[in-house]
Amino acid sequence: MSADGEAVVTVGSLLEELARREAVARQQIAEIREQIAALESRLEDEHDRLSRLVITRETVEEILGEAADNSI
């Protein structure tokens, strides 16, 4: 503290605080990137699932349509 009661900030402590904040920001970026990668993987899995369901529905409709035509 200075004589008037204010905290004294040195250039060294300011640079250390900036470096600490940088490290925190870099860590947060890394964590967010990991979350994005996990979400992209889940999204791809759901797209694959949807594709299979659409193909299955279309195949069933085709089979049922052919069975209806043959029963006439």
Image: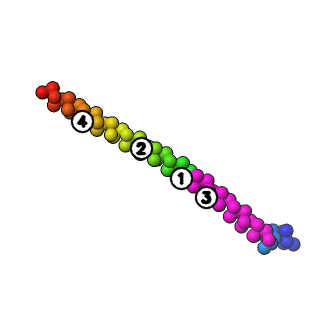
Contact between marks 1 and 3 (CB within 8 A): the answer is no
Q: CA distance from mark 1 to mark 4?
A: 39 Å
Query: Magenta residues: mostly which secondary structure?
Result: helix
Place of residue 18 in the rendered image (x, y in percent of width and height, measured from the top left): 71, 67
Which residue is under mark 1? 36
| Amino acid type, mark 2 | Asp
User: Which residue is pictured at 76% across the width and 67% down the height?
Assistant: 16
Indicate left or right for 62 with 4 as reference: left
> Magenta region: which residues?
12-34
Q: Nearer the viewer, mark 1 or mark 4?
A: 4
| Magenta span includes 32 | yes
Which residue is under mark 2? 48
| Element type where label 4 sits in the image | helix
| Amino acid type, mark 4 | Glu
Vertical relation: 10 (above or below) 34: below
Indicate left or right for 6 with 43 as reference: right
| Element type where label 2 sits in the image | helix
